[in-house]
Amino acid sequence: MSAQSLLPVGCTVLERGWLSSNNIVFTQGQQTAIVDTGYVTHSDQTLSLLRSILGECSLDLIVNTHLHSDHCGGNALLQSQYPQARTLIPPGHATEVAQWDEDTLSYTPTGQSCPRFDFLDVLQAGQSLALGKDLWEIHAAPGHDPHSVILFEPQSRTLISADALWENGFGVVFQELEGIKAFDEVAATLDVIEQLKPSTVIPGHGHVFTDVSAALSRARTRLEKFIQDPIRHANYGGKVLIKYKLLEWQHSTMVQLQEWIEQTPYFHILHQRFFIDQPVDQWLQGLLSDLERSGALEKTQGMLINRD
């Protein structure tokens, strides 16, 4: 039996990859809904996939687990196509969304894009949200993002874990890169997930999975390595940002990538906090070499080519 077949009736997971988060679509109950909308450059594809599921039905609800660009980049297009749809976001940055503060929302610091969108209300931890025919519990899940939430349906024991738990780890802990302690929050969120005892997990990226105990063990092992060696986490963060941009561009000249890096504040933060003993160019070449060795990119004829 596939993991997808264990999901609540009317719940469809669109597995998207790493540039765009997975989209979770609900077609049963009193309202149709989508949880997370992917990255802006994939927004047309998100809309097409959503329409293939909804058909002639309207979209009533847009929900974001957190406000990183790969989870809400399709909001604006979906709002333009379904103007009656209500949008719910986590409460932590509601003011910044209303004012569209791209610095605080992380889009400028990470060198990523997200079109401006509106929202109607916020998701409060401790409350429940109707998705499909079921009520999903809203739980705070700080760590990868300090304001993220996860959603849990207790009857089927299904968890929408966002980037708090993947089958093989969790998302970069951006606050740690900035010098704000947050590894403890990652650990606490993993504890919350364990206490919920989900039988099926819909992650923000990757396959739906059911071996939750093994995933939690891998995540805790990874977290402990980052705690013991923050430089390892910082290098991971730098490589993730570069890889993400290559996923968006697919190919780049070295000059183009260097110009983007120079304009992206997170690289300055990383270098100043963790790698000040190395020349910037040497540090960046090390990140690219690591990505090349892992098969994440290819250098050929002066070009950097994304490899999945």
Image (cartoon, rainbow, N blue to C red):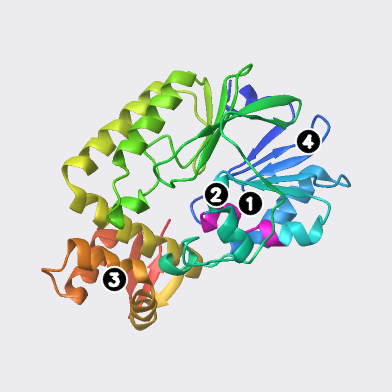
Of the pair 14 and 59, the residue shown nearer to us: 59
Can you give x and y, in whole percent of width and height, for residue 228 in the image?
16, 41
Residue at 37 percent across and 28 percent down: it is 216
249 vs 85, left or right, is left
267 vs 276, left or right, is right
Q: Quadrant of the C terminus?
A: bottom left
**Residue 9, visible in the rendered structure:** yes
Residue at 49 percent across and 65 percent down: it is 107
Can you give x and y, in whole percent of width and height, for residue 270 in the image?
26, 63
Residue at 83 percent across and 32 percent down: it is 30
The residue pinned by badge 1 equals 37
Q: Secondary structure at mark 4?
A: loop
The residue pinned by badge 2 equals 21
The amino acid on which the numbered mark 2 sits, given as a three-letter code, is: Ser
The residue pinned by badge 4 equals 27
Q: Main secondary structure of the magenta part?
A: helix
Looking at the image, is mark 4 or mark 2 earlier in the sequence?
2
- Give residue 268's mark: 3
The stretch in magenta equals 68-76
- Give residue 92's mark: none
Q: CA distance from mark 4 to mark 2?
A: 19 Å
Looking at the image, is mark 3 or mark 4 earlier in the sequence?
4
Looking at the image, is mark 1 or mark 2 earlier in the sequence?
2
Say whether marks 1 and 2 touch (CB < 8 Å). yes
Q: Where, by quadrant of the figure, is residue 153 drawn? A: top right
Can you give x and y, in whole percent of width and height, for residue 74 in the image?
65, 58
Q: Secondary structure at mark 2?
A: loop
- For label 3, the crowd category at 10 Å Cα-Cα, with few meaning under 14, some 14 to 19 and many 20 or more, is some
